[in-house]
Image (cartoon, rainbow, N blue to C red):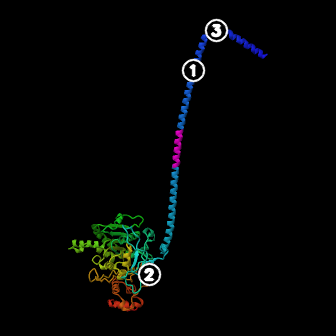
Amino acid sequence: MKSRVFLLVCLITLVFILGTLWSIHDELPTIAHDVLDAVAVVSALGALFATWRLYLEVRKHALLVKEHKQRLAHEQRRLSMEEERHQQELTERKAQQEHEATLHTAKLALLQREAWLREHLALSRAGYDANGNPPIFLGSYQGKPTITTLPPGNPPRGQIKGAKDPAPLFLGSGQDMHETQEAPIALPTAPAFREMCHLISRDRLILCYTASGPAYGTVDDLLSMAVTGKPGRGKTTALMYYVTILLSIGAEVIIWDPHGAMGELALLNGKRLSGLPATARVIYLDRKEEIIDSIAALHEDLAERDALYRPPQRTVKHPRLLLADELPVLADYDDELARVYKKREEEAPSLIKVIRRYVLEARKWRCFFIGSGQSMDAEILPTRVTESLNSRIVFFSSDRRARMAGLENEAVKKYLPLIRRAGSGIMIFDCAPQMTDLAPNAFRPSEPLRNGETLCETDDETPQEAEPANVIQGPFRVSERGDGASAKREGVRDETKRAILKMQRDGIALRDIARYVHLSGEKYPIFQEVCRELGIVSRKVEGEH
């Protein structure tokens, strides 16, 4: 039924369309043309719309590409910055790790150094050296000249002539061997100053190094000292060492250096030395005019110290060292001053007179003197002054000059060939006794020598301070055993007689003199005979010991 209705509707519609077309069949070409125009317009509009849409799509795509490129560039910049940041963090972390490692290493080194210092300070307080060896005091040598050395200074230019082998050196053929060969003498060595400076204290100084280790003493063992030797053997290094240890205990150091060998000390001239006592001070003078102008100030200081030392004050100021390098040059300065003040000799300033006061008179005021030079004959330094020196250091030099410095003839023949072959830095250390209880008699005028300032000596004579009887006592107990004088009357040497006479003139008790010259006890009758021969007569000599 429904299909029939649908068919009927379709037929009616077809009839209507055919009727309509028949009614307008005359206008069909025009309508077709209009339709074609309309189709063309629609097609053009469609093409334009399609082109516009294509343009929009292309533009959109271009914008997307541009945005994508910008995003890529931004991402690249971000990644680059991130990489740089990470690289910087890695660098900082690496630097921090290296810094921490360095700090850890330094801390470990400090701890090791602290442990080492504690150990060595404990040893040093007990008097032991770094190797655990027992202490050696210079007084143990009983005044015998000993081959020693000091901590080395700056290495000299060129090659140093030293021993060809490390074996101990033997005495040469020119020595007195007494039918038997003497034992070899080992040459001493010393560590660098920074490795031994912790052993130095106010109460105990390292005066030198022997073959057995450091030799200790006190500041009183440096009351007066002569240093002699040929150029390049270590005199200046020795002077600098003793200046350093005296500054460390608060001494004031006045330096006469006409050749400027210690010019480095000019940097400390008049300055406050940090880390040292307030009294530690360096006054460095290297010009002739400055050295001569300092004479008056030195005399004024000695006068002030003398006034403080007299009763009732009995006060002693801080130690003061007068260091005179190149004594022959200073003696020439005195000769020039003497010619200038020819008609007024009493007004002429004299460097040697200042030195003489420091050696002979100023000891009780804690004034010290160290003199250095290639020669110390009587024309340069009076024999009275040379004989009164507390210590002497002889580097390699001629036999005659070593004797002039106060070294015994036996020591000259025995040790000089050794230190000549040993090279620079090796020296002969000869110390006189430190008699703290034998102060000079202030009420007895000193007797002038017959020949003025000098004594007549032969080449075989030696000043008394180099005798084996003279021993550094210092603050340490020293064995009184030693080579005693011969029991025969002929065994008392002329040097011993002169020493007895000199100490008696200085007001020293005869019993003490007998002990110092090893004529006490059973040998006291020999001492009595010597005193009678010298015209020394007293109840102590005539009585029993």
Q: Is residue 166 magenta?
A: no
Q: Specify the farthest residue to the left.
A: 343
Labelled disc at residue 45:
1
Circle 1 SS class: helix
Displayed quadrant of residue 189:
bottom left
Give the magenta part as a residue range.
72-87
Displayed quadrant of residue 454:
bottom left
Labelled disc at residue 541:
none
Q: Kindly identify the residue that appears in the image at 39 percent across and 68 percent down.
A: 153
Q: Nearer the viewer, mark 1 or mark 2?
A: 1
Mark 3 vs mark 2, CA separation in Å: 161 Å
Disc 2: CA contacts within 10 A as few (<14), some (14-19) or many (>=20) = some
Q: Kindly identify the residue that appears in the image at 71 percent across and 10 percent down.
A: 15
Kind of residue at badge 3: His
Kind of residue at badge 2: Val
Labelled disc at residue 478:
2
